[in-house]
Image (tube, rainbow, N blue to C red):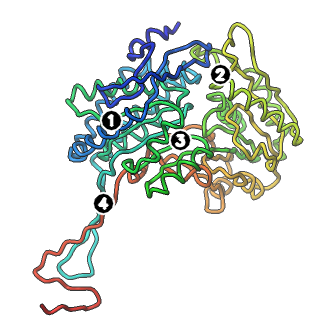
């Protein structure tokens, strides 16, 4: 059996932890937030809230650290990230257990999230030697042009509770090799994960005699987040969370002409065509809908099924739902863990009632579980509801294991349904028909940032740029050329002659 206290000790988690840190230097205020596990409702630990005085010390330290870090050659910055990745390998088990215990996702998902951290570190190490610009020909004789990318500065990262470590590291690994320093405001629902990651970073920083401020953390509610979003000393804010939060952050940062990387809501669908392999389809839909108890931004919310398969899919999926084991996520025999807190439970119940009022038919009923294994009050049964795509509740994202089953007759209709929501993160089509697959991936197909064939909507793979369109925010993280957002682009023109030809033939005779 997992000893969570032992894991906390290994990660340096105390009963009360300093919530403000520049590395080896930490600050503790009198204001405290408590982290309770949704697994069993027990207090895991407490974290001090960052006040204005502490924040000012942190931003000044980070600004100073940037002046040092930007001058370290990129491959050497990559070496530091490589070492951090090695530390994550060392601490993978206890950190994965903490993620599972503090957030409520299954242990395998917790370990998988740490593996994503390791993978992005590996990716960033290689990338540190590939921050390439372009060389261009000039129209002026004796001139040449090129472009290059320079470090941006202090990067502010606001992360969500559902991926309490991976999303932060997607940003930091790339920002660090780009020459930036980072200030992380973690979710107040999972603050101990941030403490653990900072403790691991501190080991690397100490071993390499790095200055304070390359990795910083602040903690608290949205008011603490406002400190970095309003600060013009922070040129980039990377924010993951709700669409509502993104609207506020995007507007505030734009007002001061800063840059935003927004990863917001998802309302993801799988289209199931007559040519689908139902065996993999049911598995993909099931995991997409109930994995992380439906609390992924890429969770499957809608299943758009061809009328010829509708009854068969309905029957098979409903049967699969009856086999789900709900309980302690640290027990690998369980498939579904808890929601993050009782507020999430209330939203789950409200969504079901709204669907019913709009005419939805509940196929697999939901309920809040109680009893000796469910003391936290956060365990719920995954739900399947037959619905229409235009229902108000279907149009909204509910962070819970609620799957809407929708019928279609033509592929054109299915794609219109898929695209007929305000969010545009992840999408998938299940088909063995090449024409259907290519149509779905074409300009007239899915309008999402992620479009998959014969694989579900949930999850992200390091190497591809992760993010979505429309109210998802348009940001891209992790792979491809996502690194460019952490840098500033500069175009250079060099004259290697003794003449200075002017544009449009203008001459000055001096």
**Mark 3–mark 1 contact, CB under 8 Å?**
no
Q: Residues within 10 Å of mark 4 (few under 14, many from 20)?
A: few
Question: What SS does tag 3 mark?
Answer: strand
Nearer to us: label 2 or label 1: 1
Residue density around tag 1, few if under 14, some if 14–19, many if 20 or more, within 10 Å: some
- Residue beneath label 4, please? 133
Q: Which residue is mark 1?
A: 57
Q: Is 129 situated left or right of 230 in this image?
A: left
Between the C-alphas of marks 3 and 4, the distance is 29 Å
Q: Which mark is residue 240?
A: 3
Q: Residues within 10 Å of mark 3 (few under 14, many from 20)?
A: many
Q: What residue is rendered at 51% in x and 24% in y?
A: 110
**Of tags 3 and 2, which is closer to the observer?**
3
Mark closer to the observer (3, 4): 3
Give the mark nearest the N terminus, 3 or 2: 3
Q: Secondary structure at mark 4?
A: loop
Tell me what residue is drawn at x 64 percent, y 21 percent.
Answer: 337
Tell us which disc is closer to us: 4 or 2. Answer: 2
- Quick one: label 2 or label 1, which is nearer the N terminus? 1
Q: Indicate the position of residue 408 as horizontal and vertical percent values.
A: 81, 50
Q: Nearer the viewer, mark 3 or mark 1?
A: 1
Residue depicted at 30% across the width and 57% down the height:
149
Asked if disc 4 and disc 2 are in contact, CB closer than 8 Å, the reply is no
């Amino acid at each position: 059996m997992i000893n969570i206290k032992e894991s906390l000790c290994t990660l340096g988690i105390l009963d009360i932890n300093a919530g403000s840190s520049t590395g080896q230097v930490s600050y503790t205020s009198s204001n405290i937030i408590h982290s309770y596990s949704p697994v069993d409702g027990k207090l895991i630990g407490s974290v001090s809230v960052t006040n204005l005085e502490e924040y000012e010390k942190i931003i000044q330290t980070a600004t100073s650290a940037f002046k040092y870090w930007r001058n370290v050659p990129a491959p050497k910055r990559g070496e530091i990230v490589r070492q951090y990745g090695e530390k994550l390998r060392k601490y993978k088990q206890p950190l994965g257990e903490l993620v599972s215990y503090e957030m409520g996702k299954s242990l395998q998902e917790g370990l998988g999230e740490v593996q994503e951290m390791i993978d992005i570190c590996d990716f960033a190490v290689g990338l540190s030697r590939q921050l390439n610009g372009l060389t261009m020909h000039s129209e002026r004789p004796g001139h040449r042009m090129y472009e290059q990318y320079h470090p941006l500065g202090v990067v502010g990262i606001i992360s969500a509770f559902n991926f309490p470590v991976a999303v932060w590291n997607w940003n930091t690994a790339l920002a660090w090799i780009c020459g930036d320093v980072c200030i992380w405001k973690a979710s107040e629902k999972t603050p101990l994960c941030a403490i653990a990651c900072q403790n691991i970073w501190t080991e690397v920083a100490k071993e390499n005699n790095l200055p304070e401020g390359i990795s910083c953390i602040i903690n608290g509610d949205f008011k603490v987040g406002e400190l970095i979003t309003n600060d013009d000393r922070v040129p980039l804010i990377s924010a993951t969370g709700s669409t509502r939060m993104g609207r506020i952050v995007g507007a505030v940062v734009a007002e001061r002409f800063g840059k935003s990387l927004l990863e917001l809501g998802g309302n993801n669908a799988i289209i199931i065509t007559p040519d689908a392999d139902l065996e993999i389809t049911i598995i993909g839909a099931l995991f997409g809908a109930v994995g992380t108890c439906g609390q992924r931004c890429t969770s499957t919310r809608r299943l758009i099924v061809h009328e010829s398969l509708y009854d068969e899919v309905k029957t098979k999926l409903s049967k699969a739902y009856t086999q789900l084991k709900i309980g302690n996520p640290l027990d690998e025999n369980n498939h579904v863990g808890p929601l993050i807190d009782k507020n999430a439970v209330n939203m789950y119940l409200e969504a079901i009632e709204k669907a019913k009022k709009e005419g939805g038919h509940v196929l697999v009923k939901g309920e809040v579980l109680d009893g000796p294994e469910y003391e936290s009050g956060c365990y719920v049964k995954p739900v399947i509801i037959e619905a229409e795509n235009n229902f108000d509740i279907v149009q909204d994202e509910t962070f819970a294991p609620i799957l809407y089953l929708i019928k279609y007759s033509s592929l054109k209709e299915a794609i219109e349904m898929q695209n007929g929501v305000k969010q545009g993160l992840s999408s998938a089509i299940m088909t063995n028909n090449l024409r259907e697959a290519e149509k779905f991936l074409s300009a007239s197909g899915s309008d999402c940032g992620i479009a998959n064939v014969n694989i579900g909507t949930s999850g992200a793979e390091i190497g591809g740029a992760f993010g979505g369109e429309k109210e998802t925010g348009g940001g891209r993280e992790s792979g491809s050329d996502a690194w460019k957002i952490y840098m500033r682009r500069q175009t250079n023109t060099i004259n290697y002659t003794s003449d200075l030809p002017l544009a449009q033939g203008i001459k000055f005779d001096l």
